Image (cartoon, rainbow, N blue to C red):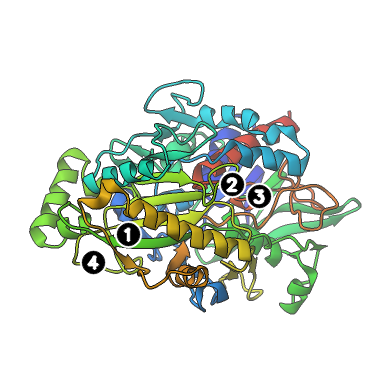
Amino acid sequence: MESAGEYDYIIVGGGTAGCVLANRLTCDKDAHVLLVEAGGKDDYVWIHIPVGYLHCIGNPRTDWLYSTQADAGLGGRSLMYPRGKVLGGSSSINGMIYMRGQAGDYDHWADLTDDASWRWDKVLPLFKQSEDYYGGASENHGAGGEWRVEKQRLSWDILNAFRDAAQQVGIPKTSDFNGGDNSGSAYFDVNQRRGIRWNTSKAFLKPASRRPNLTIMTGCHVERLLLETTESGPRCMGIVFTGGGTQWQATARRETLLTAGAIGSPQLLQLSGIGPAALLREHGITPVLDSPGVGGNLQDHLQLRMVFKVQGVKTLNVMASNIVGKMQIGLQYALFQSGPMSMAPSQLGAFAKSDPQQATPNLQYHVQPLSLDKFGEPLHAFPAFTASVCNLRPTSRGHVHIASADSYAAPKIVPNYLSTEPDRKVAADALRLTRAIAAAPALKKFAPQEYKPGVQFQSEEELAQAASQIGTTIFHPVGTCRMGVAGDASSVVDSQLRVLGVDGLRVVDASIMPYITSGNTNSPTVMIAEKAAQMIHAAWK
């Protein structure tokens, strides 16, 4: 085994959180930082063209190519489960939507951890700190930061009509989803700069890469954490990884920071002997620390993709149906960085309540001027739009467990979608609400006809069945190294993100969320990394 050197901090994973941490920690010229990433550089052209996510998801160059186990709640279906394997991580392949969630999400985290610093009013300055908002600085937004937020560069008549229809059934229009209350409908703000994807690698890592105290190693697969038993218990001393056909060891003088995401972080902990003891022994791994919560508490947003055929209005299905249309779309982007190639996967958003008893919106819509049977397949030949709706606060819980002691073997991902009665009820209510929007006067001129799941699903039981047939992930896994308090067996890290029972080790990514945020999860992960950097700096100064 070769030595890769000694550093103050080792960051395991060059995704969203890892890029932010690398930038912030290297602001201290005395701190020497190593960032290790299993994937390659973000120099693949399709990363940067917004519509290029279609070429990045399911591509071994940029995606870990995970799949879920067969899920009973989805009728035994297995789903593809994209996770970014490239600098920038999932920010290089996601939908680019800038979304913070709701104030209550963070207040709830603060209550669970008995740490008021996680409250909304305390984390809002962290969101603003990194933000470069197109509208300039204000009470809710920041300007001049690394994380560029822009308006989308096109609109659609069919989506404008959907927004009007949503208003007619009680979902008001809004101008900003990110003030702590995301109720209403609007076009999503996106992480783009002039029609080009703005991932965390470009935003945070590239500026930091010029600093002499940052070392970046790509194409390096971390096999396990390097743990040492001390009088006070286990301590993380660094990592063991393989790169260029050689096994390496890197040591950390201060801390190792696990930023491998909601799938990778629990997998690495388990491979290193930190996790449910019975699971570890099953795979021949000697437990260093019996931590039952590692890999548990998996939460995700399950989207229900309803498709409606329409008439007399432009949709992408028709625009991209022939060579001339495709050439026009390509030319528009080449000349102006506008048009469909600048599109986020979803353009229009809406947040609503599945029933009046909900204190805040518990449904999120992603509405698209297109339709297809499933991701990766061709667009339908007929004009249509898709209204995807997800339950923002699912009660179903899954897990991520290693399938082998081999670090190269994919873990078993078991989301357990729709495994609770409340989730099935919300799903049925969501489908009914979508039908009400489609039947509203504003959409009448386009004669929407439900194509999926189909009008034959009517009763509560039938609608729950329909949800199991059309439900698919919206790629928001979180929670598998949940933040909590010492003494709670399900907690993996404390409110400082330190792994409970192990010195010198923190987890900094979406896996620490005790409850999923009420919206897209990428920018909350940026905030988590900003906060972690402050906590790490304070601990060593």
Q: Sequence-wise, which precedes: disc 4 or disc 3?
A: 4
Viewer-nearest of labels 1 and 2? Answer: 2
The local secondary structure at tag 2 comes to loop
The local secondary structure at tag 3 comes to helix
- Which residue is labeled 3 in the image? 512
82 to 133, vertically: above or below: below
Viewer-nearest of labels 4 and 1? Answer: 4
The amino acid sitting under disc 3 is: Ile
- Which residue is labeled 2 in the image? 358
Q: Sequence-wise, which precedes: disc 1 or disc 3?
A: 1
Q: Quadrant of residue 228?
A: bottom right
Viewer-nearest of labels 2 and 3? Answer: 2
Q: Which mark is residue 345?
A: none
C-alpha span from label 2 to label 4:
36 Å
The amino acid sitting under disc 1 is: Leu
Q: Quadrant of residue 373?
A: bottom left
The amino acid sitting under disc 4 is: His
- Which residue is labeled 1 in the image? 54
Q: Which mark is residue 380?
A: 4
